[in-house]
Amino acid sequence: MLSGLSAEGLSETKEAIAGLPDASEAVCFQVDITNRDAVNAMLDSVQKAFGRIDAVVANAGIITPQTSVLDITERDWQQNIAVNLTGTFNTVQAAARLLVAQGHGGTIIATGSSTAVRVMPGFLPYVTAKSGIHGMMRLLALELAPHHIRVNTLVPGTTATALAQSISGHLEKAASSLPMGEVVEPKELGRYVAFAISDAVPHMTGAQLIVDSGRSIA
């Protein structure tokens, strides 16, 4: 199941999945994660359609332009908190409620950021929201452990997304500052998430899954 705000993005991802070997057809939901009722309704629909939910990945997020703390607008602040932190909370809370009610464990992953480990000046709203996700997921892992629900945080560094590639020179500049000299590829993150939600690591919970070419330790 896929969800997102962009119908075009959902369609492109659905087509990409369809091209994979032995892939099932993806079901798409166009949802604004800041809308709590919409998130709840989406997961309820998924559970009814498939009979159960095994894993939920809260990956939606935004980032506003680099701005000095002296010039951050209320809109920039509120938008980052609403989407990155509150939207993620809406998703993981709804997932937790369903997984607990089902009674057979499961996995929840949310996307944090290496900027919450090694902060980056000029991105205060974003770093604040992502830092909140890191703390929220650690506490959620502790609360849900008795239910055998694993909760982990994906912590990517600079990644070669379509948006990042559209900014001339951005990825090259970022790569030059990284210990490994390369940015992260989106498919690499996908493989890591697939591993983390699998049965291969049944006791991994409360972890930060850092994939950032060494940025957070430099």
Image (cartoon, grey):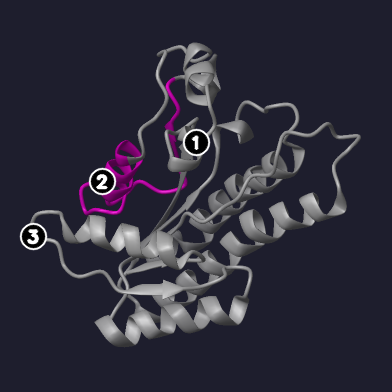
Q: Which residues are magenta?
A: 187-213
Q: On the picture, is 86 further left or further right than 170? A: right
Q: Is residue 51 visible?
A: no
Say few, some or many: other residues with alpha carbon within 10 Å of mark 3 (under 14 / 14 to 19 / 20 or more).
few
- In 3D space, how far apart are the residues under numbered discs 1 and 3 (Cα atoms)? 32 Å
Type of residue at label 3?
A: Asp
From the image, tell me which residue sits under label 3: 22
| Residue 169 position in % (x across, y down) | 52, 21
Specify the quadrant that holds the C terminus. Answer: top right
Q: Earlier in the sequence, mark 1 or mark 3?
A: 3
Mark 3, secondary structure of its residue: loop
For marks 2 and 3, the one nearer the N-term is 3
Q: In the image, what residue type sits under mark 1? A: Ser
The part of the image, by quadrant, that contains residue 56 is: bottom left
* Residue sitting farthest toward the right: 70
Residue with the mark numbered 2? 195
Residue 150: quarter of image:
bottom left
Q: Position of residue 162 (x, y in %)?
A: 44, 41
Pointer 1: what residue? Answer: 166
From the viewer's perspective, tell me whether residue 125 is left or right of residue 108: right
Above or below, 14 relative to 131: below
Give the class, few, some or many, for how many residues have Cα within 10 Å of label 1's Cα (few <14, many ≥20).
few
